[in-house]
Image (cartoon, helix red, strand yellow):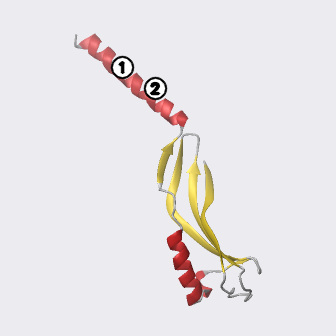
């Protein structure tokens, strides 16, 4: 089973970095996970966020955010619309399900003809 992480929303913000004090070097990114195997694809509901400074090449954790960064974070969190969480079956699984349903129907018909007729 493979697990992929894809970006829902990414935005460069104009605030100063709390570590290196560089201006216009912060990037907010929102990620969502997706598990996939040969039968189905599952999109998870949990959304992960990250604030990254391109100047000092570090992730800025929420404990060091100031009120301005938190306000911009709340705005961009509203803009990020995650994909709907759930399962999506692949063609291979649909064919297997179809064959299973046809087999059960044929077995039921054979049983009905053999024993109740």
- Which of the two residues, 8 or 39, is positioned nearer the viewer here? 8
- Residue at 52% in and 50% down: 42
Horizontally, residue 114 falls left or right of residue 37, namely left
Exactly how many numbered labels are in the figure?
Answer: 2
Question: Relative to 91, is 80 above or below?
Answer: below
- Which of the two residues, 117 or 12, is positioned nearer the viewer here? 12
Question: Relative to 2, is 25 above or below?
Answer: below
* Mark 2 vs 1, N-terminal side: 2
Dot 2: what SS?
helix
The crowding category of the residue bearing disc 2, from other C-alpha atoms within 10 Å (few below 14, some 14 to 19, many at least 20), is few
Question: In the picture, which quadrant includes the C terminus?
Answer: top left
Figure quadrant of residue 97: top left
Is label 2 or label 1 in front?
2
Q: Which mark is residue 107?
A: 1
- Residue at 32% in and 21% down: 108
Question: Relative to 86, is 114 above or below?
Answer: above
Q: Which mark is residue 55?
A: none
Residue 70 lies, in percent from the top left, at 55, 84
Residue 47 lies, in percent from the top left, at 53, 66
Q: Which residue is mark 2?
A: 99
Label 2 to label 1, Cα distance in Å? 12 Å
- Which of the two residues, 109 or 91, is positioned nearer the viewer here? 91
- Residue at 47% in and 56% down: 85
Dot 1: what SS?
helix
Q: Residue at the left extreme?
A: 116
Question: Relative to 105, is 117 above or below?
Answer: above
Residue 57 lies, in percent from the top left, at 76, 77
């Amino acid at each position: 089973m493979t697990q992929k992480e894809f970006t829902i929303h990414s935005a460069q913000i104009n605030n100063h970095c709390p570590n290196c004090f560089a201006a216009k070097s912060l990037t907010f990114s929102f990620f969502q996970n997706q598990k996939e195997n040969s039968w189905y694809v599952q999109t998870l509901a949990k959304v992960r966020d990250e604030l990254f400074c391109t100047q000092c090449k570090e992730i800025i954790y929420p404990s060091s955010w100031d009120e301005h960064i938190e306000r911009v974070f709340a705005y961009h969190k509203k803009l990020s619309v995650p994909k709907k969480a759930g399962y999506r079956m692949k063609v291979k699984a649909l064919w297997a399900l179809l064959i299973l349903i046809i087999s059960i129907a044929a077995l039921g018909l054979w049983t009905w003809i053999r024993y109740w007729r």
